Image: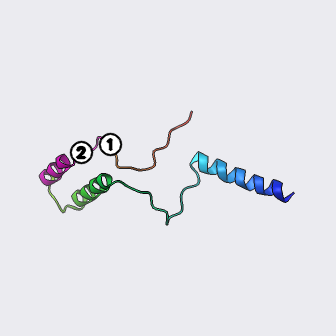
Amino acid sequence: MFVLFLLLILGTLFLLRRGGHLHSPPWATPHRSPEAEAKRLLAERFARGDISSDDFLERASVLNWTPGSDTWETSKRKKRR
């Protein structure tokens, strides 16, 4: 009886995790590449108004990044139909 209950809990957790309803704990931060972190910081500085649009575009070109063309590394999930 206990084993069945344990399997039921584990199965539920597995399905929730697989379906995307159960996320990582808040203290487990995802590892980001230095390039992704630089893009994030650059976008934040521009959004705060710390740098002008010319500075933003110049620094983005140094990173070989066209703003709006991609996102930095986040969890990319496939949509199921």
> Which mark is first along the chain, 1 or 2?
2
Residue 11 vs residue 45, the one in the foreground: 11
- Secondary structure category for the residue under label 1: loop
- Please name the colour scheme applied to the rendered image: rainbow
Q: Is residue 64 magenta?
A: yes
Quadrant position of the C terminus in the picture = top right
Q: Amino acid at mark 2?
A: Trp
In magenta stretch: residue 31: no
Q: Is residue 73 above or below residue 25?
A: above
Outermost bottom residue? 27
Q: Which residues are magenta?
A: 54-70
Residue topped by disc 1: 70
- The picture places residue 79, in percent across and down from the top left corner, at 52, 38
Q: Residue furthest left?
A: 54
- How far across and how far down the image is residue 10, in percent? 71, 54
* Front residue of 79 and 39: 39
Image location (x, y in percent) of residue 19: 60, 46
Name the kind of residue labelled 1 in the image: Asp
Q: How far apart, in angstroms, are the residues tagged by discs 2 and 1?
A: 8 Å
Look at 84% across and 59% down and name the residue there: 2
Task: Tell me the element at label 2.
Answer: loop
Residue neighbourhood size for the residue with mark 2, other residues' Cα within 10 Å, grouped as few (<14), some (14–19), many (≥20): some
Residue assigned mark 2? 65
Q: Residue at x 55, y 36 (%)?
A: 80
